[in-house]
Every structure is written in structure tokens, then in C-alpha cells.
Amino acid sequence: MWKRAIIGAATLRRQCVSSSVRSSSSSSISSAVDSMLLRSLKDHYLEVSKLNLPPKVGPPSPFTIVKGALDSNGPVLKRSYNDEEVSISVMRLASNDEEDDGAIHQLFIHVDVSKPGEKESLMFLCALYEDALGIHSVSMRPKLHHNAYLIIPSQYTGPTFEELDERMRDAFHSYIEERGVNESLFKFLQAWLYVKEQRNLLRWFKTTGLFIDGKEPATGS
């Protein structure tokens, strides 16, 4: 979905430059390029703004949406489990399918389980699909605060998940399942990521256009 819009913008920009180079003086070339690029950015902004998003869905109970998550790179969902806090961050999982149309069929999620008074939390990196969830790794990391970036540790974080015996792997799957982390999260996180990607792309078209046009973006743009 987004891939088509981005490729289209790049193609139009090359066409703008090519046609302008065959034009007159350098100043008029620069003006023509700016004008055509601004028109291209506006056209693609309007195209992306009209894209149909998935129906709005809420997160599975008892998860709630982290305030401001759409405008940050931090956790999306959170919940309490006994004295623990469970938070979930999400990103698109890269596809090797050359015919990929930009649709989101698989997700990469970070599951952070923290306890009060502890400086570290238990971090699960998982692949999430509509009908399955697979754990990639389990590690102890510095506690993640809301709206914060993930911290890459400088010390040993444990064995790879495949190195664990089957019984331990099954036990870790049961551990996060008890905390509500399973394939039931997929529909919400998929829809949420579509909305976030659309907002990011619209913001990029707008701020890039304002920069080229020499205008200051409005606060909060």
C-alpha cells in the first residue's frame, strides 16, 4: 500500500528533473524542479490520505493503548499482571516476497515484563502472525520506560532461543501466554501499524513540501 505511493513519488521526481534539465537557464530549472516536486508531493499526500484503512478495532482486554503511542517509537500496549507491568512494542517484520503489495502479514513485537523495584526487565522478541506467535529470543534488559527507545545491551543477554531445550521453550511460551501475549493481538497491532505508517508518510510529504517551499511547519506537524 505505502510502497506504491513511495515508488510513485520517486518516479515522478526523476521525471521532473529530467524534463527540467532540458529547459532553459539554471534559475528557471531550479524553480521548475521545485514547482513540479511540490506538486508531486501534494498529489501523493492526497493519494495516501484517501487510502482505505482497516476497520478500527480495540486491543484485547485487559490491554490498553499507551497514550501518545502513535507519535512515539515506544510501547503501544500495556497491562498489569499481578505486580508486573507488561508492555508491547511493534514494528513491521520484513518480507522476502518480491510480489509483496505492502500489506502487513507478519509483525515483530517486543514484550517487556517488568516488576516494581527491579532495574531490569524480561524482554521477549517475537514474530506475530494472525494464527501464531513465535519467540525469537529472551533476555534481561534495562527496564524500558514508556515512549523510550529500546536499549541495546553491552553485556551478555543469554543463549539464543533455539539453544534452549524444548521443555524450556514451551515453558516460556506458556509464560507470555498467561500474560495475554498471543495471536489475538495481531488484528489490533496490524490496524494500528497501518494508521501509524499512514500518519508518518503524510507527515513526511507535508514537512518535506514545507521545507522545499521555504515555509516553517506548524507546531505539532
Image: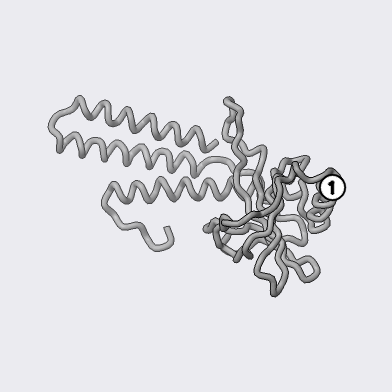
The residue lying at 73 percent from left, 50 percent from top is 185
Q: Horizontal placement of 158 versus 151: left or right? A: right
Where, by quadrant of the figure, is residue 33 drawn? Answer: top left
Q: Horizontal placement of 3 versus 206: left or right? A: right
Nearer the observer, 200 or 84: 84
Neighbor class of circle 1 (other Cα within 10 Å; few <14, some 14-19, many 20+) is: few
The residue lying at 55 percent from left, 58 percent from top is 149
The residue lying at 59 percent from left, 45 percent from top is 194
Q: Is residue 55 visible?
A: yes
Q: Is residue 187 visible?
A: no
> Disc 1 marks which amino acid?
Asp
Nearer the observer, 174 or 98: 174
The residue lying at 77 percent from left, 49 percent from top is 182
Quarter of the picture containing the N terminus is top right
User: In the current view of this chain or complex, which residue is farthest to the right?
Assistant: 167
Query: Element at badge 1?
Result: helix
Q: Residue 168: where, in percent of width, then height?
A: 83, 49
Q: Residue 129: where, in percent of width, then height?
A: 72, 41
**Figure check: 98 above or below 93:** above
| Residue bearing the label numbered 1 | 170
Where, by quadrant of the figure, is residue 85 drawn? Answer: bottom right
Quarter of the picture containing the C terminus is bottom left
**Figure check: 201 above or below 154:** above
